[in-house]
Image (spheres, grey):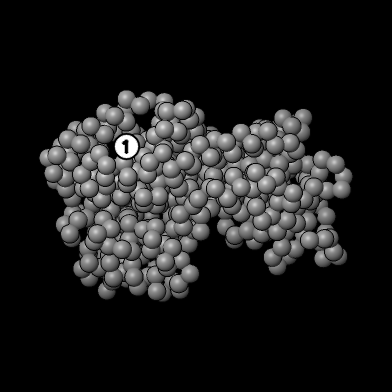
């Protein structure tokens, strides 16, 4: 793509950041605090990516991520520094799994809680205790961000292969499937033994919070403080004729170009291949190796209260081929829902998200309502409105061998010359905390390289 008269130049910025998710916004905020100018370009019409929300008819809807785990320590500290400490509140965290139309509740705080879980047989309960003990014994080998040779050994098998080889099928279907559906937006056949054990290890300390005004309250505040350009899809990034500078070309309805000393790409890595000129082939191959599960989130507002429900409700795939998780949002904060009404956020399972991704909103809503109505008869009759949100890169999948591939990819990125930096979940796995950390790290590195 060459320059033409429709493009105007802006040479007043040190860094252009691609993507206004939490990684890009964190990078921009870090640069601003250091006195470094940046412009954030976002292809969509809103900020935050999957950490976004909207208000509709008095309901506050989370479009993607719906809880904030206590383990997100760096991001939580950042949020408190921004003055949003009082906006983050603990949730009930109550969880149920539906099997054969029957609800089974469990509140995990200790491995011993599985001994009272009526969904499992006595043998399955003992096996879950063994799995907890085994996961704890692996220690640092389960640190996916800092892998060891033992870590790589643990990811040779898929979670499904491991569980079917060593345990009863019930563990795969009633424990592993709901975990992967909720945490990874995927399935145990497409994720590794390592991913399963790392998740099991942390279940005992898993406390979750929510924002009283929705997940998007923090990104929206950051947008007010930063120079964010919405509806600005980047179509090409190339080295400029002047050494050390980059041309960033934006398409869409208002095409233009920017000239910057550095670029931070805070978008899913597979998207980078098509927009960066001259990307080394081994790096491009590494980006292609990162696999994502698509995700569809459907918000359903109804004119009826459901006070006795759990916050998070998992559905087994033998019973439902459409929905993986149903969240009752009144558990996050009563201020999110008008009095006398309810809001349900239904997250589709990975196969259904792939199958229905290109279908009209109405068809998706119809399929979701049909299945929610089976659990809560009369639900569909009380519908006020529905909203459908599609995420083509919902979550990174930790397939067998992927942690080793991503480890090698991070090493290649560290050795990459020039002021082209990368941030986001593709470097490790999908997590708001990881996205935030990589955004801050990218900002620090680019300032160091620019001598700022």
Label 1 neighbourhood size at 10 Å, few (<14), some (14-19), many (20+)? many
- State the quadrant of the C terminus: top right
Residue 345 in view: no
The residue drawn where x is 70% and y is 59% is: 235
Quarter of the rendering occupied by the N terminus: bottom right
Q: Residue at x 85, y 64 (%)?
A: 4
Secondary element under disc 1, as helix, strand or loop, is: helix
**Quick check: 157 left or right of 5?**
left
Q: Residue 205 placed where, x, y %?
A: 32, 33
Pick out the residue farthest to the left: 122
| Residue of label 1 | 200
Count of all numbered marks drawn on residues in the image: 1
Q: Residue at x 74, y 49 (%)?
A: 278
**Quarter assignment of residue 426:** top right
Q: Nearer the viewer, residue 6 or 343?
A: 6
Can residue 270 be seen? Answer: yes
Point 17% across, 35% down: residue: 126
> How far from the left and from the top, in percent, is residue 355?
42, 66
Residue 323 vs 163, above or below: the answer is: below
């Amino acid at each position: 793509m060459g320059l033409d008269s429709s493009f105007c130049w802006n040479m007043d910025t040190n860094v252009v950041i691609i993507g206004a998710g939490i990684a890009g916004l964190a990078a921009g905020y870090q640069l601003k605090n250091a006195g470094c100018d940046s412009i954030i370009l976002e292809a969509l019409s809103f900020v935050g990516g999957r950490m976004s929300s909207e208000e509709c008819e008095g309901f506050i809807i989370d479009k993607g991520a719906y809880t904030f785990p206590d383990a997100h320590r760096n991001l939580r500290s950042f949020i408190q520094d921004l003055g949003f400490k009082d906006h983050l509140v603990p949730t009930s965290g109550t969880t149920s799994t539906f099997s054969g139309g029957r609800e089974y509740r469990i509140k995990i705080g200790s491995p011993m809680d599985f001994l009272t879980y009526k969904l499992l047989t006595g043998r399955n309960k003992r096996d879950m205790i063994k799995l907890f003990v085994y996961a704890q014994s692996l220690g640092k080998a389960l640190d996916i961000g800092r892998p060891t040779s033992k870590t790589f050994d643990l990811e040779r098998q898929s979670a499904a292969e491991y569980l079917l080889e060593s345990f009863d099928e019930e563990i795969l279907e009633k424990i592993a499937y709901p975990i992967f559906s909720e945490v990874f937006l995927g399935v145990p056949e497409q994720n590794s033994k390592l991913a399963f054990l790392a998740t099991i290890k942390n279940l005992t300390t898993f406390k979750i919070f929510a924002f009283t005004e929705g997940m998007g309250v923090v990104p929206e505040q950051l947008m007010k403080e930063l120079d964010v350009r919405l509806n600005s899809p980047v179509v090409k990034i190339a080295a400029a004729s002047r050494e050390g500078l980059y041309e960033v070309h934006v398409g869409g309805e208002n095409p233009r170009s920017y000239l910057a000393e550095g670029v931070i790409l805070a978008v899913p890595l597979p998207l980078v291949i098509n927009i960066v000129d001259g990307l080394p082939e081994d790096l491009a191959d590494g980006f292609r190796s990162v696999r994502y599960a698509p995700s569809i989130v459907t918000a359903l507002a109804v004119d009826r209260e459901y006070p006795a429900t759990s916050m998070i409700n998992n559905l087994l795939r033998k019973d439902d081929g459409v929905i993986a998780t149903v969240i009752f949002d009144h558990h996050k904060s009563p201020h999110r829902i008008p009095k006398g009404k309810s809001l349900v956020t239904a997250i589709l399972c990975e196969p259904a998200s792939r199958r229905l991704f290109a279908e009209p909103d109405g068809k998706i809503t119809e399929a979701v309502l049909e299945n929610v109505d089976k659990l809560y008869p009369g639900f569909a009759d009380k519908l006020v409105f529905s909203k459908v949100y599609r995420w083509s890169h919902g979550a990174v999948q930790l397939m067998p061998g992927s942690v080793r591939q991503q480890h090698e990819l991070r090493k290649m990125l560290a050795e990459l010359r020039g002021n082209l930096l990368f941030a986001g979940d593709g470097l490790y796995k999908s997590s708001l905390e990881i996205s935030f950390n990589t955004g801050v790290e990218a900002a620090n590195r680019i300032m160091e390289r620019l001598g700022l």
